[in-house]
Image (cartoon, rainbow, N blue to C red):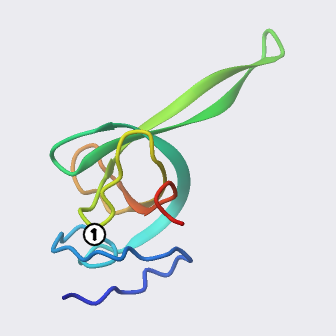
Amino acid sequence: MKKTKNIGINVIPPKETCLDPHCPFHGRISVRGRIFKGQVVAKDIQKTAMVEWPRQFFIKKYERYEKRKTRIKVHNPVCINAGVGDIVTIVECRPLSKTKSFVIIQNESSKS
């Protein structure tokens, strides 16, 4: 059983353990930079999830706001295992692949 390490962010660590080297709690990856909360809209087999959150964009010509959404691919560690529809907290890390530079650190839907 691997010990959970402190990642420097005030979140509840997962109860499960994993052998994933890209897990911030049990692997070698360190986290830094921006933190976001969003909803998982897609889940892939390769430990990847798609997270999106809404934002407002100002259109200067019409002096109004329009709704837009931000969608990014994130690493989904085995110990967290977020599913479609879950609200998650993600944090920036070093690039893990061509499109992944974020990792899920907390599943808000499963904490009780």
Q: Residue at x 35, y 77 (%)?
A: 15
In the displayed image of the protein, which residue is found farthest to the front? 112
- Give x and y (percent) for residue 72: 40, 40
- Give x and y (percent) for residue 49: 31, 44
Quadrant, the C terminus = bottom right
Asked whether, in this view, residue 112 is left or right of residue 80, the answer is: right
Q: Is 91 drawn above or below residue 74 in the view shown?
A: below
What amino acid is at disc 1? Answer: Cys
Asked whether, in this view, residue 79 is left or right of residue 111, the answer is: left
Q: Residue at x 60, y 33 (%)?
A: 54
Quadrant, the N terminus = bottom left
Looking at the picture, tell me which residue is in the foreground, 28 or 76. Answer: 76
**Mark 1 residue element:** loop
In the displayed image of the protein, which residue is found farthest to the top? 62
Q: Is 3 drawn above or below residue 82 in the view shown?
A: below
Asked whether, in this view, residue 60 is left or right of residue 4, the answer is: right
Looking at the picture, tell me which residue is in the foreground, 22 or 85. Answer: 85
The residue pinned by badge 1 equals 23
Disc 1 residue crowd, few under 14, some 14–19, many 20+, Cα 10 Å = many
- Give x and y (percent) for residue 108: 52, 58
